Structures are given as structure tokens and as C-alpha cells.
């Protein structure tokens, strides 16, 4: 790339915030403009379905940086303005209001959008919501009153977190999941079993192996007919059936896509002046093209893009980690496990448990429930490319820190 004096970042999440901050702290003195379609400055999204929805975190605490930070570091925020087109020839970005922004380096950190239920299945009825951004959380919060029946569609982490908050607020919660077990796409059966038991102990009804055929109601949702023929009454429905990457701008600009915006080892797209980071970026990792939807990845990749804009040519090596809070359980995940991995279960007292994933004898991931020590040890081993004897892991008498030696 030629000299970069003007950087435009499209997106208002973790990746965008990490990137612009890293640019400044790494000595970049040129122009930085962050374009965000939402009116709020970049904020944390994971707490929306956890602490924020539970009333344990204020709106301001969600913000990744106070507004003054951007002023102090000469970072221009264009909030509430959607980018509508990229002209790669003139190196400009068009905004919805008609303004055109020039760039030397452009970053797409546009995130993802929840998949809705189709309108012909009742997805357009009042009372049917998704959970992804502040507007979603603000719309849902006043509706979560103890006299309501809530149907959660989807047994991934977003659905389970929403179910937990609602159950704690006294709602009658039913969760349906089309797979054979909750968390079937992202976790081992042992982890599914743990969270199924946890939720049912709090009164949540979990129906697996079925899904919504269609919602019922006129104007406002009243219930659902499931694919097994059964019915569920519902005053509210939260849909958590996955997301689609916001790659429309990239597609219109002719960039290479692969279930997201395809990037190389330096997070560059097929246009060397355009980068992508966060949930929208599809990268090559361990022989697979994938998007890693996590806070850790968004931060790390955003900072990597900043360094590469500065010409440092640093390859991006993901270190996947995730977390989820449900009731009194804190789940911490390191690495990426698969359904066919060998699982070693380490039991502790009460709700303490960790599930260790082995592939061809090598430790590749861990799900740690209320077990931060197991998480810390396994994460360090995985990132170092080391493993641990499964027999020692399963033995509750083993000092886990000794596994690091």
C-alpha cells in the first residue's frame, strides 16, 4: 500500500473501537473517521443479553470508551449515519445523507444481523423480537414482566442467556431448539447436559428436536405451532437462530466473499486497501475458512488491522475465547471444539465442572463452568500448543497448575 493518511472505519462494535484506539496509541497521526449506523458510540454487545437486560449494568457502562476519548484522540465519530456504497476506484465511501468520505485505508467492521423468523411464519407479529443491539435490549426490557409467557426460539448462547434473565424475572419460559440438543452447534453433549439441567432447575421448559412451524396471533403474537404438532402459548417470542454477516457493502463493491468477507492472513480483503475485522470477517484458520464471533477475536483482529495499516505486516493468529453468564454460572470457553472430539469431564463441587476437548490426543478446547482455574490452565496450554494427560485432567485430586510445567 501507498502512504496512509486517511482511515475510514465502518462499524460501531468491539473491532472498530479497538482498531481506532490502537491506531492512535501506535503513533498514527492521520485522519481517522468511524462511521456507525447506531446513535451510540461503540459499545459492548455481550452484556446486552446478560447484565444490561438484567438491570445490572447502565447504558454508559456499556460504552467501550467515553465520548471524550474520541475527541481527545482526534477520532471523528459519524454516528447515526449508514454507509451506503464503496467506490474502490475513487477510494470513497458514500453515506446515506449524501456525503462522500475519501479513504486511503478502509476497514469493514460491520458485524452481523440476527436471522429473523420469516414473515409468513409469523415473524412480523408484534411481540416477536431479536437480541443483538441496544435498541433490541431497550425494546425487550419493559416487556419482561412476571405475568408473561415467553417463547425462546433457538438453543444457542443468546437464547439461553435471554431465557435465564427472563426466568429470573419470573416469566414462564419455554425454549425450543431444532437440533437434537441445545448448544449442538457449538458445544459437546456434556456441556449441553449441564445447561439443560441448570435451566430446568430454574423452571425453564426445554423442547429439543422441534422448532416453530408458525406463530399464531392477529397483530400480536399469541403462541406457536411446533413442527411436531404441539402448541405453545406465548405473549412474547425471542428469536435466536443465528446471524448473517453484514457483507452487503462488500458484495456490492465486488470484494470476495465466503459466508462473510474473505480476508487473508493480514486481514486484507481482495482489495489491498480494504480490510475487514470482527464478526463479518471470514478468515483461514486451521485449514478452514470461518468467522469467529467473539469479543476476543474482534479486539485482537481490530488491533491487528491497525498494525497492518501502519505497514507492519503482522499475520493474524486467532486465540478464540468466549464466555456466557447464566443464573449463577459463569461459562468460560477457550479454543474451538468439534462434535467428534473426545471429551474429558472434570467434576468439582456444586456447579463447578470443566469439559476438556481432545482431538487426536491433543487438547484443543475447554468449556469451564464456574471453574476459572481450569479455564486459565487449559487456555495457556492451548495457546502454547501443548496438551495434558486426560487421566490427570479427570482426576479431581490433580493440581491443575502442575499441568503447566
Image (spheres, rainbow, N blue to C red):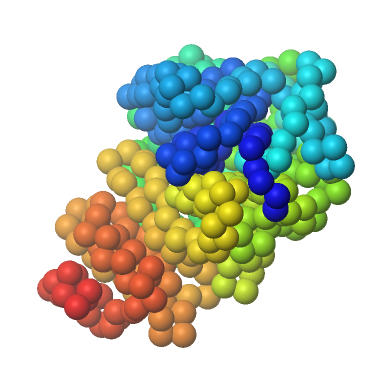
Residue at point 45% right, 44% down?
26
Q: Looking at the image, is 95 positioned above or below residue 120?
A: above
Residue at point 26% right, 52% down?
370
Q: Nearer the viewer, residue 39 or 106?
A: 106
In which quadrant of the rendered view does residue 30 lie? top right
Q: Looking at the image, is 395 positioned above or below residue 238?
A: below
Q: Where is residue 372 in the image (x, y as percent from the top left)?
A: 24, 55
Residue at point 46% right, 58% down?
320
Q: Position of residue 302 (x, y in %)?
A: 53, 46
Does 57 sit left or right of 309 as displayed?
left
Q: Which of 155 and 61 is in front in this view?
A: 61
Residue at point 78% right, 44% down?
250
Q: Can residue 253 be seen in this view?
A: yes
Q: Looking at the image, is 288 positioned above or below residue 106?
A: below
Q: Where is residue 261 in the image (x, y as percent from the top left)?
A: 72, 51
Q: Looking at the image, is 234 positioned above or below residue 154?
A: above
Q: Is residue 135 visible?
A: no
Q: Where is residue 248 in the image (x, y as percent from the top left)?
A: 79, 40
In which quadrant of the rendered view does residue 72 lie? top left
Q: Nearer the viewer, residue 339 or 290?
A: 290
Does 383 sit left or right of 139 as displayed?
left
In which quadrant of the rendered view does residue 119 lie? top right
Q: How many labels does the image show?
A: 0
Amino acid at each position: 500500500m501507498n502512504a496512509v493518511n486517511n482511515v475510514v472505519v465502518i462499524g460501531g462494535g468491539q473491532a472498530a473501537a479497538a482498531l481506532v484506539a490502537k491506531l492512535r496509541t501506535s503513533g498514527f497521526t492521520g485522519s481517522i473517521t468511524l462511521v456507525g449506523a447506531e446513535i451510540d458510540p461503540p459499545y459492548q454487545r455481550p452484556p446486552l443479553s446478560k447484565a444490561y437486560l438484567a438491570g445490572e449494568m447502565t447504558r454508559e457502562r456499556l460504552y467501550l470508551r467515553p465520548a471524550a476519548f474520541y475527541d481527545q484522540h482526534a477520532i471523528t465519530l459519524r454516528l447515526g449515519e449508514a454507509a451506503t456504497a464503496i467506490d474502490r476506484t475513487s477510494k470513497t465511501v458514500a453515506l446515506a445523507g449524501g456525503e462522500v468520505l475519501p479513504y486511503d485505508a478502509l476497514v469493514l467492521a460491520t458485524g452481523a444481523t440476527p436471522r429473523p423468523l420469516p414473515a409468513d411464519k409469523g415473524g412480523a407479529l408484534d411481540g416477536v423480537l431479536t437480541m443483538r443491539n441496544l435498541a433490541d435490549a431497550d425494546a425487550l426490557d419493559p416487556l419482561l414482566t412476571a405475568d408473561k409467557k415467553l417463547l425462546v426460539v433457538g438453543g444457542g448462547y443468546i437464547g439461553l442467556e435471554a431465557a435465564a434473565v427472563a426466568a429470573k424475572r419470573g416469566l414462564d419460559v419455554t425454549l425450543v431448539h431444532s437440533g437434537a440438543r441445545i448448544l449442538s452447534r457449538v458445544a459437546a453433549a456434556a456441556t449441553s447436559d449441564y445447561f439443560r439441567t441448570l435451566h430446568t432447575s430454574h423452571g425453564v421448559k426445554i423442547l429439543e428436536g422441534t422448532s416453530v412451524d408458525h406463530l399464531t396471533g392477529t397483530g400480536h403474537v399469541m403462541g406457536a405451532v411446533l413442527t411436531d404438532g404441539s402448541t405453545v402459548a406465548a405473549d412474547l417470542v425471542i428469536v435466536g437462530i443465528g446471524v448473517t454477516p453484514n457483507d452487503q457493502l462488500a458484495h456490492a463493491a465486488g470484494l470476495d466473499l465466503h459466508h462473510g468477507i474473505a480476508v487473508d492472513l493480514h486481514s486484507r480483503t481482495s482489495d489491498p486497501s480494504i480490510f475487514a475485522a470482527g464478526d463479518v470477517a471470514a478468515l483461514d484458520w486451521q485449514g478452514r475458512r470461518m468467522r469467529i464471533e467473539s469479543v476476543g477475536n474482534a479486539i485482537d483482529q481490530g488491533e491487528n488491522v491497525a498494525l497492518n495499516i501502519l505497514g507492519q505486516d503482522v499475520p493474524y493468529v486467532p486465540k478464540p475465547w468466549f464466555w456466557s453468564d447464566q443464573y449463577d454460572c459463569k461459562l468460560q470457553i477457550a479454543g474451538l471444539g468439534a462434535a467428534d472430539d473426545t471429551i474429558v469431564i472434570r467434576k468439582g463441587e456444586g456447579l463447578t465442572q470443566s469439559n476438556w476437548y481432545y482431538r487426536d490426543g491433543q487438547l484443543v478446547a475447554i468449556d469451564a463452568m464456574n471453574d476459572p482455574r481450569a479455564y486459565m490452565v487449559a487456555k495457556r496450554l492451548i495457546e502454547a500448543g501443548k496438551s495434558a494427560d486426560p487421566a490427570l485432567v479427570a482426576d479431581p485430586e490433580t493440581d491443575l497448575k502442575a499441568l503447566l510445567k
